[in-house]
Image: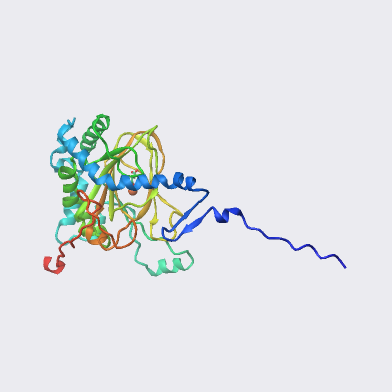
């Protein structure tokens, strides 16, 4: 008869009391060693919150200073948007979209579908699908020429001149450290607002009626800049926007390809991203909630105009960042596109 083995003592790892501590109130896992470590790790959060609180006012102050002391090198880009700045294909697509009887099918003939609507299931398709995994949701990403080469060049010259000036500069967002906020430069009124109201609105109303495309009432427009020694790539994110226009302005560059996954709410995120090359003067249209990022820049400099398009009629019900009913705080300018008042509702039947 063998001797009974001494009972084994089971243990736990000490990390149980210091790592991955879940704070249900914040929905966050944190690490705790000491009060001092806690302050070191999470102290910057307090600064970031402060920075965000001051953002609107500081931006308004920069805008006022730029308006009074900055001398543009290309004053022509501040003139109100003229058709000569826009690519003929863009003018044609917008004009078609605003015409009576325009429909999605007609518009799709006037732009390039990078990743389109799901096909109506035909009997063959249905048979095929029996042996295939369910296809990922269609991304509904489109491309079309937006500006003329002349306008891209003029805007780039102006932006570069501003970059090199000693004027104060706000940065596009927390992910991009270089670039320009167009409203600070005074380009919202002459350029971006007419672009949204006259051209993007009719296009987006046909392409994305379910995402507020017909109800766009504000925007946040900025230029992102990638260069050696500066930002070179952009991590995967979704935009604080219902819809986004991203136009490559130049200069000459390699790399920087955009990649797109599923909608951020969808479970299978970035399994097989769609790669979309930039073409100078052309714009990519996508839903703000579509996960995306930019691959590293190779050589050269890349400047892209990004317009985050917002529809208060949509976001007033659900903030896309916290996915809850927004808790409104007054802000400067367009703020983040929410409004206290409901936008007037239009009886669509009365329009026909
Ligand atoms: O780098 C780019 O062109 C994409 C920029 C972008 O997605 C953004 O700023 O939201
Ligand atoms: Fe983005």
Asked if residue 106 shows in the view, the reply is no
Along the line of sight, the residue nearer the viewer: 208 or 40 = 40
Q: Position of residue 31 (x, y in %)?
A: 50, 51
How many numbered discs, if any?
A: 0
Point out the residue furthest to the front here.
Answer: 35
Along the line of sight, the residue nearer the viewer: 25 or 257 = 25
Left or right relative to 298: residue 55: left
Left or right relative to 172: residue 154: left
| Residue at the image position 43 percent from the left and 47 percent from the top | 42
Q: Quadrant of residue 109?
A: bottom left
Q: Quadrant of ligand 1?
A: top left
Point out the residue furthest to the right here.
Answer: 1
Locate the N terminus by quadrant: bottom right
* Rendered view: 342 above or below 156: below
Q: Position of residue 340 (x, y in %)?
A: 20, 60
Q: Position of residue 172 (x, y in %)?
A: 30, 43
Q: Quadrant of residue 187?
A: top left
Locate the C terminus by quadrant: bottom left
Colour setting: rainbow
Asked if residue 319 shows in the view, the reply is yes
Q: Position of residue 236 (x, y in %)?
A: 40, 49
């Amino acid at each position: 008869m063998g001797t009974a083995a001494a009972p084994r003592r089971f243990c736990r790892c000490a990390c149980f009391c210091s790592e991955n501590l879940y704070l249900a109130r914040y929905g966050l896992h944190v690490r705790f060693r000491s009060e001092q470590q806690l302050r070191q790790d999470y102290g910057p959060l307090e600064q970031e919150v402060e920075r965000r609180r001051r953002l609107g006012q500081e931006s308004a102050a920069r805008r006022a200073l730029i308006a009074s002391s900055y001398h543009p090198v290309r004053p022509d880009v501040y003139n109100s948007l003229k058709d000569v700045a826009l690519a003929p294909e863009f003018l044609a697509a917008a004009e078609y979209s605003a015409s009576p009887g325009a429909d999605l099918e007609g518009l799709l003939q006037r732009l390039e579908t990078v990743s389109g609507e799901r096909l109506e299931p035909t009997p063959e398709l249905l048979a095929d699908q029996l042996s295939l995994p369910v296809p990922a949701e269609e991304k509904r990403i489109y491309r079309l020429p937006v500006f003329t080469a002349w306008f891209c060049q003029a805007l780039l010259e102006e932006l570069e001149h501003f970059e090199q000036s000693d004027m104060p500069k706000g940065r596009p967002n927390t992910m991009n450290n270089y670039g320009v906020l167009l409203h600070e430069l005074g380009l919202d009124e002459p350029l971006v607002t007419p672009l949204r109201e006259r051209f993007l609105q009719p296009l987006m109303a046909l392409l994305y009626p379910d995402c507020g495309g017909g109800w766009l009432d504000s925007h946040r427009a900025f230029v992102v800049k990638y260069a050696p020694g500066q930002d070179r790539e952009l991590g995967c994110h979704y935009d604080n926007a219902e819809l986004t226009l991203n136009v490559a302005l130049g200069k000459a560059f390699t790399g920087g390809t955009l990649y797109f996954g599923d909608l951020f709410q969808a479970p299978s995120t970035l399994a097989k991203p769609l790669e979309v090359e930039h073409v100078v003067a052309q714009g990519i249209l996508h839903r703000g909630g579509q996960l995306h990022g930019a691959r590293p820049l190779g050589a050269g400099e890349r400047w892209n105009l990004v317009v985050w398009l917002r529809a208060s009629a949509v976001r007033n019900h659900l903030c896309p960042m916290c996915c809850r009913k927004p808790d409104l705080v007054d802000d400067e300018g367009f703020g983040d596109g929410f409004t206290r008042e409901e936008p007037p509702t239009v009886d669509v039947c009365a329009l026909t």
